[in-house]
Amino acid sequence: MDVQAPAPSPAPAIVISGFLGSGKTTLLLAALHHLRRLGRKVAVLMNEFGDISIDGEILRGEGFSVMELSDGCICCQIGEDFVQAFTEVASRKPELIFVEATGLADPVDLLDQATAPHLLDRVTVVKMVTVADPKNFTRLGKVLRAIVKRQTQFADVVVIGKADEATPEQIADIRRYVEEHNPHAPVYLATQGQVPGDEGFRWLLADVEPAERERRRAAMRANLDALSEDEYKAHTDFHSLSCRLLRPLARERFERFMQSLAPDVVRAKGFVRFEGEAGLWVTMYVNGDLYIRPVTLSPSPEEHLVFIGAKLDHARLAKDLAACEARRRALAVL
């Protein structure tokens, strides 16, 4: 008599969402390093809004395997590709899957994609994490009210990223917002992806009883507001511009350019080299804040920048960026 082997259990998945530049990749990278030290087999599915990968290159350069979906938002424009990618990642039989969504993703649509019928026996989304940027949260809550609200409402956990850069008032504002819109979600403060006093990532990796998880999600859905046409348009109006850099840049000119970006540019990121300075530098720009730091990645990515915003002047951005080259040459716009 043949005895059939029991069907394998679905792989648990943790979804990390949060608006552009909130600190999702920093949190993910810290968790991955922790799990690698424990010898855990982890898979990563990452969605980049631009058509060139930045965050994926950072993870790969740190030695992690990443499957990417680029040039669109995971919850709508590339939904079918997301289901296929999720299926492929699950087929590798990881112990845990991390999904990092683009900052514009609607977590409700994303969860609907992740619970497609033919994924149910392969993947179970065990936790929805939303990362909030304390310096920009209040302003974004007014400009992109629906997306910020949904990302908060549908979170099992809310993490205040970059907590070391926040004022007590900014942290209090987020706590009040979460208490109003999702009082059952615990709030954690993180610096460089780490929650002080919880080096084991217990807050992130602790399991939730399935029946309780489904009860919470049903209650969340019941309280969700429908997106109006204008609110949905605010989500889909964002675009990206990718530029490959052909020569090193003059640091001073580049910093002036980045610090004078129009308010329509809400996010920029990429890899650059500077004339007279060794090595590769990663650039991160979030709503007026500019961060430039040296980085060593293997393999080393090409120098390129991605700009994201609602109304991008592609020609002007490419021209002004080209003017930052130490020795002026053509700039490849992709």
Image (cartoon, rainbow, N blue to C red):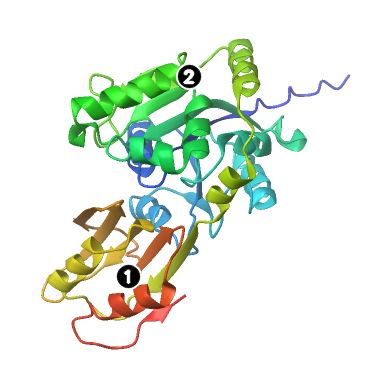
Q: Residue 144 vs residue 174: left or right? A: right
Q: Give how far across and how far down residue 217 sits, in percent.
A: 61, 20
Name the residue: 26% across, 59% down: 282
Give the camera-side residue of 197 and 266. Answer: 266
Left or right position of 50 against 274: right
- x%, y% of residue 290? 22, 55
Tell me the tag on residue 182.
Answer: 2
Q: How far apart are marks 1 and 2 (CA)?
A: 41 Å
Q: What element carries label 2?
A: loop
Q: Nearer the viewer, mark 1 or mark 2?
A: 2
The image shows a total of numbered marks equal to 2
Task: Classify residue 225 as left or right of residue 250.
Answer: right
Residue 156 vertical position relative to residue 96 in the rendered view, above or below: above
Q: Residues within 10 Å of mark 2 (few under 14, many from 20)?
A: many
Kind of residue indicated by mark 2? Asn
Residue at coordinates 65% horizontally, 20% vertically from top-left? 222
Residue at the image position 45 percent from the left and 62 percent from the top:
311
- Secondary structure type for disc 1: loop
Q: Position of residue 292 (x, y in %)?
A: 20, 57
Q: Can residue 322 be seen in this view?
A: yes
Which residue bears the numbered disc 1? 303
* Structural crowding at the residue carrying mark 1, measured as other residues with C-alpha within 10 Å and reported as few (<14), some (14–19) or many (≥20): some
Return the x and y of residue 271 as percentages of the image width and height.
30, 64
| Foreground of the two, 88 or 115 | 115
| Residue ranking furthest to the right | 1
Q: Classify the position of the N terminus by image quarter.
A: top right
Residue 277 lies in quadrant? bottom left
Upstream in sequence: badge 1 or badge 2: 2
Q: Is residue 40 above or below residue 85?
A: above
Quarter location, residue 40: top left
Query: In this rendering, does residue 195 appear at all?
Result: no
**Which amino acid type is shown beneath numbered disc 1?**
Glu
